[in-house]
Amino acid sequence: MPRRFGFYFHSLTFWICVAIVAAVVLAVLFPRVAMATEIGGELFLRALRMLVVPLVFTSVLCGVLALGDVRRLGKPGAYAVLYYLLTTVVAVLLGITLVNLIRPGSGTVPSERMEEFGGQNARTTKRQIINHLARATDLPAADIAEVMQPLPDGQPLSPQIRDIARGLSLMLVSDNLLAAAVRNELLPIILFAMVLGGVLTTIPQQVQTLTAVIQQANEVMMRLVLLLMKLAPLGIFCLVAARFGTAQYEDQLLTELRQIGWYFATVVGGLAIHGCVVLPALYWLVTKRNPFRFAVGLSRALLTAFSTASSTATLPLTIQASMSAGVSREATEFVVPLGATINMDGTALYEAVAVLFIAQALGIPMGLEQQWIIALTATLAAIGAAGIPEAGLVTMLIVLGAVGLPVEYIGLILSVDWLVDRFRTAINCWGDAIGAAVVDRLAIGGDHRNPPSVASHGPQS
């Protein structure tokens, strides 16, 4: 980080911060003007998503090839999965603890407002839920329907653990890899790249030309990321201005925060504890380095994650920033893409808090057994959450159904979910980067110095 103040004006992080502040000010003062910037934000978001599939494919391949022997893949993979499960479970338990201590739902929603969402015994079919969420979140109905595919049509939402496990298992393999790429389904692409990379390491002499092409393609993709980052402040300004401007124009944010402010504070407080205490402590215990200095190196990616509310769209920047912050290329290219797909600490914490908040608002007691079910299903559902804005709402339906709560009451939190989504996405990306550093130290033997790579020549924080 530059020590002289003048250098801050050449820092990408500085200009991203300026863009966010300016966007919020514009949204508050001139909401209709802010809403008109939506097209710029959408173009920037599409440009980021355009890079995701080719970058993930080449980076995972390069990460596996860098290990040199497919037999070395097991240790980093085991540590990565162990890290994902550990941090996700800790996040869920933290959220459950806070919501039981603070009890944000008790008495916060008047009974007359509950009637707007239907009675407690109302039965909502899968099709009704899909249509409702498509309208509320602007997500394609096909994306929502795909997440809820294991559930039968025409019946109330009541998924079992086996349905969730089956859905997660089927997500690993696609019968059409190109179709998975079109739909930005990263898990089958990552799995295919890992298997292909493993096979290539067994015949290194015969595939030298192909290996060189893969590595060169990865370098080109990183150059494109660096080029796109030059437009990041403008794109982020448009994204934030349009979304906050819409909230200000509809006068919904402050009204809802007054109504369910304790819920918002509980979720954001839990995310803050997890992101500022739990994850940094784990980073320091493993690497013996300053986690907050590491956070400064990740600041560009974290601010972009907050602005886009999409861990998938932020993935190119997370990879680039992680390598710039000193994580080895092997660990970054292997762990970060996988983490962006299945490591959703912020989403898991949010879903646990939101479900118990709804139960408290309805006056439905949740015993220890039901809370354990919430913890388990929130962990599994978060793993299956797509890296798109507000996808946590879709998977939260699974958690609600698992403990028999009426899903129509998800409307209690819809109006502020877009803002909560930004905080939890930033925590998801922060967890991915720390996971790469942890695996780098434990399994790959990286010394956490700044490696020579194209990423190190990017804008400095």
Image: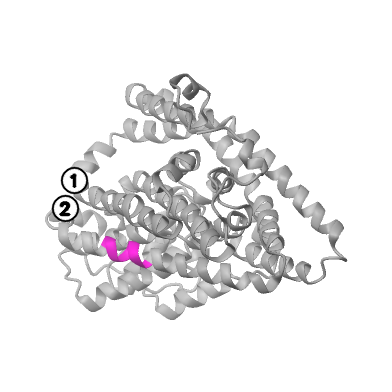
The residue that disc 2 covers is 109
Q: Give the residue at x 39% y 64%.
A: 88
What numbered label is drawn on residue 127?
none
What span is colored magenta in the figure? 89-95
Amino acid type at circle 2 is Val
430 vs 63: above or below: above
Task: Identify which residue, 380 or 144, lies in the foreground.
Answer: 380
The tag earlier along the polypeptide, 1 or 2, is 2
Task: Identify which residue, 394 or 437, lies in the foreground.
Answer: 437
Secondary structure under tag 1 reads helix
Residue 227 visible (yes or no): yes
101 vs 135: above or below: below
| Residue found farthest to the bottom | 162
Secondary structure under tag 2 reads loop
Mark 2: few, some, or many residues within 10 Å (few <14, many ≥20)? some
Q: Give the residue at x 43% y 44%.
A: 295
| Residue found farthest to the left | 107
Mark 1: few, some, or many residues within 10 Å (few <14, many ≥20)? some
Label 1 vs label 2: CA separation?
7 Å
In reply to whether residue 420 is colored magenta, the answer given is no
311 vs 159: above or below: above
Pinpoint residue 458: horizontal percent, then vertical percent. Answer: 61, 35
| Callouts 1 and 2 close, C-beta under 8 Å | yes
- On screen, residue 304 versus residue 129, left or right, reads right
Count of marks overlaid on the render:
2
Residue 135 visible (yes or no): no
Amino acid type at circle 1 is Gln
Q: Give the residue at x 55% y 59%.
A: 440
What numbered label is drawn on residue 259?
1
